[in-house]
Amino acid sequence: MIEVKNISKSFADQQVLKDISFVFEKGKTNLIIGQSGSGKTVLMKCCIGLLDVDKGEINFGKTCFSCFSEKEKRKIQKEMGVLFQGGALFDSFTVEDNVMFPLNMFTKMSLEEKRERVNTVLKRVNLLNANKKFPAEISGGMIKRVAIARAISLRPNYLFCDEPNSGLDPKTAELIDELISDLTEEFQMTTVINTHDMNSVIQIGQKIAFLHKGELWWEGDKNVILKTDNEELNEFVFSTELTRRINRN
Amino acid sequence: MKIIQEIGAYVWLMFQAFKRPDKGKVFRRQLMMDFQDLGTNSIGIVAVISLFTGAIIAIQMAYNIDSPLIPLKTIGFSTRQMMIVEFSPTIISLILAGKVGSSIASEIGTMRVTEQIDALKVMGINPANYLILPKITASMIYNPVLIVFSIVLGIFGGWLAMLVTGLSSSVVYIEGVRSWYDPFTITYAMIKTLVFAFIIASVSGYKGFYVKGGSVEVGRASTQAVVYSSILIIVFDLILTQMLLT
Ligand SMILES: Nc1ncnc2c1ncn2[C@@H]1O[C@H](COP(=O)(O)OP(=O)(O)O)[C@@H](O)[C@H]1O
Ligand SMILES: [Mg+2]
């Protein structure tokens, strides 16, 4: 469980996050949704320790993460897996070396054990026969899979995904969503996902926070999101022709 | 004001970089890769430029000696001296600033804009230490080797030129190379080389590390890395020469 308590964050004179409180639950896929520029990435970066909050607290379980120094933060960071928007694979490493990287850094496993773990997670994300390829040689969907494999290679307790299906075709996007959702349940992780994709919202939104201009405008889940009378949320939800048509019927 | 900020950020980054690596094995692997990228891949250009420059210096000296009072062995002596004190340590370092500096800045800059540096950081790794320290170490170990190689090739180039043009005999040239030798010139050359190697790797690493934006900014940072390190090399050349030779 991750608890965000009254956090605010500004850049220069622009306040990006305004007094946000929310709880991301364990074993669930927690979604942060909102328009581009609403502050989703900034909120996530605060949670993983890439940005410092101006006010408020972020607690992992009972530990106050945002109170920690950079060095103390690392201990909790080692329990996190993060999937960046572009995958952020190391392009001088092969797929296999990318996934093995956290194991090299933080475990004392033998090469055999590491190979085995790498193959297990790559198989888990349905990526076979790509071990020796470089990131530049594989497709966007495969990059996301490798990035997920790298994120879960140390069996994290917390998984963060920034727009995991941006730039993917609808079918692949759905597969990635399913994968993240399955892994969350399997490893009982606290998963936080940034998205502006309504498909994901309906499919895996077990808990949803809707950000609007840096404020937490609405919270709920996939079962109630289509039936609210929150004007800004409805505008976001029914922002495409497809959803509008479905809504009319 | 801005320059003070930049210097502050640079110094802070160096403090981050100069920490004990988390894993020795991983550091050594990075170091080996950087030896290859920053050192071995520069051998070709260093060889060609040094060989030709040595030849050119020797020929110019030969044509400029028209008084019978100046012994012909001055050719060998001057070629050696020029290679050791100025050409190899400074000019080759400037060339490496162009080649190695831009490659360091664009590699690290690309990692920044594609969030690879963020990825390292959230894994709990100190990215400055992981990325920049091996590059500084590799440059400071490999550049002296390249410079010695350049000196030797330059002197050899001069000898070859004498042989081909017949402006001086091989024996006299070699005698010149061995005349009036002061070992301190080598020390002086090595000190300069080490300082310049540090400048190249650290300034370029710094420029890449703080890139904001996209590919255009990465390109700009890599140009700036070359400009800044070149200027600093010349400035420090002056300072070190004043300090060491007076
Ligand atoms: N490092 C930064 N410096 C200044 N402004 C930033 C920074 N990061 C984000 N912002 C601003 O914060 C706002 C929210 O950005 P972001 O969280 O990336 O939105 P999104 O919801 O699309 O992920 C934007 O207006 C952006 O310009
Ligand atoms: Mg974003």
Image (cartoon, coloured by chain):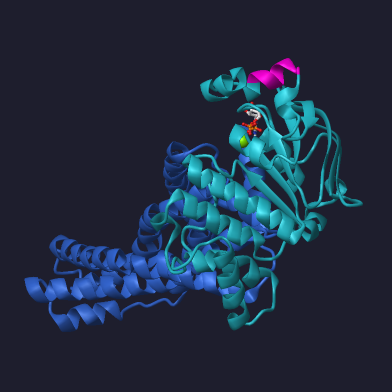
Chain colours: A cyan, B blue
Ligand 2: give its quadrant: top right
Q: Nearer the viewer, residue B24 or B233?
A: B24
Q: Residue at x 57, y 20 (%)?
A: A244
Tell whether A135 sits left or right of B17.
Answer: left
Residue A49: percent from left, percent from top: 74, 47
Percent position of residue B8, x then y: 67, 44
Q: Residue furthest front?
A: A249
Q: Residue at x 46, y 42 (%)?
A: B218
B60 or A11, nearer to the observer: A11
Residue furthest top as drawn: A231
In this view, the residue farthest toward the right is: A62
- Residue A49 seen: no
Considering only vertical position in the picture, is B153 above or below A210? below
Q: Position of residue A40 (x, y in %)?
A: 68, 34
Residue A99 image offset from top left, x and y in percent? 57, 65
Which is nearer the eye, A218 or B10? A218
Dominant secondary structure (helix, strand or loop) of the stretch shown in magenta: helix
Residue A204 occupies quadrant: top right
Please say whether residue A233 is one of the residues in the magenta stretch.
yes
